[in-house]
Amino acid sequence: MNPHALRIGHGYDLHRLEPPPPNGHGRPFVLAGVRFDHPVGPVGHSDGDAVYHAIVDALMGALGLPDIGQFFPDNDPKWDGQDSEVFLEAARARVAEAGYAVVNLDMTVICERPKLSPRKTEMMANIARVLGIELGQVNLKGKTHEKVDAVGEGRAIEVHVVALLARE
Ligand code: MG
């Protein structure tokens, strides 16, 4: 089998969660482009969308490319508060340029709150739309961290993504 016919990539992201200014540096809580009403939000240079960031890293990883921070440096004022959808669009373009298509994405979002289940379909639909794939190619699972450590105490959110690409 051609070793380049299929490529797998893994992405991971974590963002600290804080109240909005003046009590912290949290931005509005956005995950996969879906805005949640929540008292704390991600600290980050862009909008802090940990799901989109981890997907970008999974896609870049599958292509053997550097991580999101090298393409979109967090010291570049251009990306301050940036809607992370543009990073995902850029990753989609890289995948296409390299001659690949996304087979499927599987992800796990770990946070204590908010409850993701009521908005899961919306999140997966956003991902499918931005990547130009079917909803059935996207899977998202929500988990808690059983109240332990920073994630379990609601001070951070963590995302893991695995992406499979196939040569077109
Ligand atoms: Mg990030």
Image: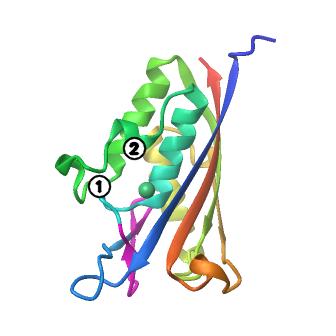
Up/down of 97 relative to 151, above or below: above
Residue lying farthest to the left in this orientation: 77
Up/down of 92 relative to 11, above or below: above
Q: CA distance from mark 1 to mark 2?
A: 15 Å
**Which stretch did the figure color magenta?**
30-43
Are the residues tagged 1 and 2 within 8 Å (C-beta)?
A: no
Left or right of residue 33, residue 154 in this image: right
Q: Which quarter holds ligand 1?
A: bottom left
Residues 91 and 119: in front is 91
In magenta segment, residue 36: yes
Task: Give the mark nearer the N terminus: 1 vs 2.
Answer: 2
Kindly state the secondary structure of the residue where label 2 is placed.
helix
Q: Position of residue 116 (x, y in %)?
A: 56, 74
Kind of residue at disc 2: Gly
Left or right of residue 29, residue 109 in this image: right
Q: Circle 2 is placed at which residue position?
A: 69
Q: Circle 1 is placed at which residue position?
A: 83
Kind of residue at disc 1: Asp
Up/down of 39 relative to 140, above or below: below
In magenta segment, residue 82: no
Residue lying farthest to the right in this orientation: 1
Q: Residue at x 38, y 37 (%)?
A: 70
Residue neighbourhood size for the residue with mark 1, other residues' Cα within 10 Å, grouped as few (<14), some (14–19), many (≥20): some
Q: Is residue 119 visible?
A: no
Q: Position of residue 156 (x, y in %)?
A: 51, 74
